[in-house]
Image (cartoon, rainbow, N blue to C red):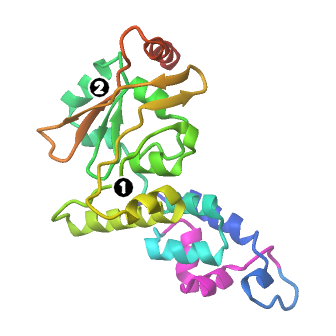
Amino acid sequence: MDDERNTALGTFLRTHRALVRPEQAGLTAAGRRRVPGLRRDEVALLAGLSAGYYARLEQGHERPTHQTVESLKHALRLDEHAAVELHRLARPATRDRRDRVSPHLLALLDDWTAAPAYVLGRSGDVLARNALATALHDRFTHCGNLHRMIFLDPPDASSSATGPPRPRRRARPARRRRRHCAVGELAIASAEFRRLWAEPGPRGPVRPGTCFLHPDVGELHLRTEVFPISSAPGRRLVAQPAEPGSRSADALVLLSTLAA
C-alpha cells in the first residue's frame, strides 16, 4: 500500500465497532469487557479476516479490497450512509491529480474564467478543475468522481444521468478491477443506479448535471459541452457555460467573485 497511513479508515473502524454490542452480532458477552462494543478479534471473526490483518487495518497499514469492505460492512452492521463512507475511506488516496494533466491543459483551465470547466478521466474521475468548477462542486461529498457525485450525493446537489457508466473494451486488469469495485459500490448505495443498470439494451453515457442549487448563489441552469482530448485518449474536457444574459450567467459571475 502507499507509505502514508490511512488513519481515517482506522478511526472509522474503531468508532463503529464500539457501537455494536456483542449480542447484536450474535456473540456471547461473557465476563467483564474492557472495551465498549466489539473487540478487534470479534470483528475479524465476523468479517472472516485474520485478527492480525484486521489490526493492521485499524492501524492504517492496509487497504482493504472491495470484498473485505463488504464483509466489514456486514460485521459492523453499517447503514447505507456509513457503508458509502467506508467504501470512500477504503479507496486509495488520490494525490496531486493535477500532476496527471498536461501543463498546457491546466493553463487553459485556469484561464477559463467565464464557466465551470474540468477534466474527466476514463472512469469518471475529476482530474482537474478551474476555480468556478471547484466552487460549484465543493459541497458534494463525492466530488472526486462524476459517477459518485451523480448517484451518491443528495438529489438537490443536482446532476443528471441517462444511464450507468458504459463498460469499455479491452480495459487493463487493474482498471477493470477498479470499475468493478465502482459498479459494486454504486449498486449497493443507489436505487437509481440499480434501476438503470438493470435496464435492457445498450447503456448510455453518464452526463454531468445541468441544474445546480448552490447555497450562495441559488439555482443555476447550465449548458454542458464535452470535448475529447486528442492528446490524452479517454479523457474529456467538460465546460458548463450559462446562456448569456440569463440569471444563471449572473449567478456564475457572483460565484466567481466568491471563489476569488
> Marks 2/1: CA distance?
27 Å
Q: Identify the residue at image location x=61%, y=76%.
A: 74
Q: Secondary structure at mark 2?
A: helix
Q: Most extreme residue toward the top, as rendered?
A: 245
What is the magenta range? Answer: 34-61
Question: Between residues 200 and 189, which one lies in front from this camera angle?
Answer: 200
Q: Is residue 168 left or right of residue 38?
A: left
Q: Locate residue 30, reporting x and y percent.
A: 84, 91
Look at the image and tell me whether residue 7 can be seen. Answer: no
Query: Up-down: is 11 above or below 225?
Result: below
Q: Identify the residue at image location x=25%, y=59%.
A: 202
Q: Is residue 110 left or right of residue 59?
A: left
**Residue type at mark 2?**
Leu
Question: Between residues 55 and 199, which one lies in front from this camera angle?
Answer: 199
As for residue 45 lying within the magenta part, the answer is yes
**Residue labelled with disc 1:** 164
Position of the N terminus by quadrant: bottom left
**Residue labelled with disc 2:** 109
